[in-house]
Image (spheres, rainbow, N blue to C red):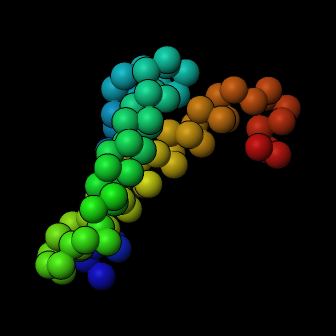
Amino acid sequence: MFVCVTSPISGAILSGYLSKKIGGYESKRVVPMALVAGIVSIVAVVPFPWVEDYRYGILIIWVVLFCGAFILPILNGVLLCVVEPELKEHA
C-alpha cells in the first residue's frame, strides 16, 4: 500500500517541479529528462527476475512506479504544447 501511494504521487509532483524549473514543457531539455527517467526505470527492472529478497523487489517496484509517474505528466505537457490551439480539446 505504501509503495502504491507514495511512488506515483511523489513522481508526479517532482516531475512538475523539475519541468517548471528547467523552463516548462516548451523547453528542449524536458524530453531528455523524461528519457533519463525511462532509462532508469528499465535499468532498475532488469534484475527483478533474479531478486530473492522481497525488500529489493519492493524497492524495484517503487522505482518503476515513480519513473512512470515522472514521465507521464512531462509527455502530456509536451503533447499539449505541440498541438494547435483548436485541437487541444481532442488531444
Examine the rendered structure and indicate whether residue 42 appears above or below residue 17: below
Left or right? Give the position of 15 relative to 87. Answer: left
Viewer-proximal residue among 80 and 45: 45
- Name the residue: 38% across, 62% down: 65
Left or right? Give the position of 17 relative to 89. Answer: left
Query: Quadrant of the rendered structure where residue 35 is?
Result: top left
Q: Give how far across and how far down residue 80 sits, in percent.
A: 67, 35
Viewer-proximal residue among 10 and 35: 35
- Name the residue: 29% across, 55% down: 44
Q: Work out which residue is located at the far front of the displayed protein and give it.
A: 50
Q: Give how far across and how far down residue 21 sits, in percent.
A: 34, 26
Examine the rendered structure and indicate whether residue 49 appears above or below residue 45: below
Q: Give how far across and how far down residue 32 sits, in percent.
A: 44, 27
Location of the N terminus (image quadrant)? bottom left
Query: Quadrant of the rendered structure where residue 66 is?
Result: bottom left
Left or right? Give the position of 86 relative to 8. Answer: right
Total marks placed: 0
- Name the residue: 85% across, 32% down: 86
Q: Give how far across and how far down residue 62 sits, in percent.
A: 28, 65
Q: Is residue 48 visible?
A: yes
Q: Is residue 62 visible?
A: no
Location of the C terminus (image quadrant)? top right
Q: Work out which residue is located at the far right of the displayed protein and give it.
A: 86
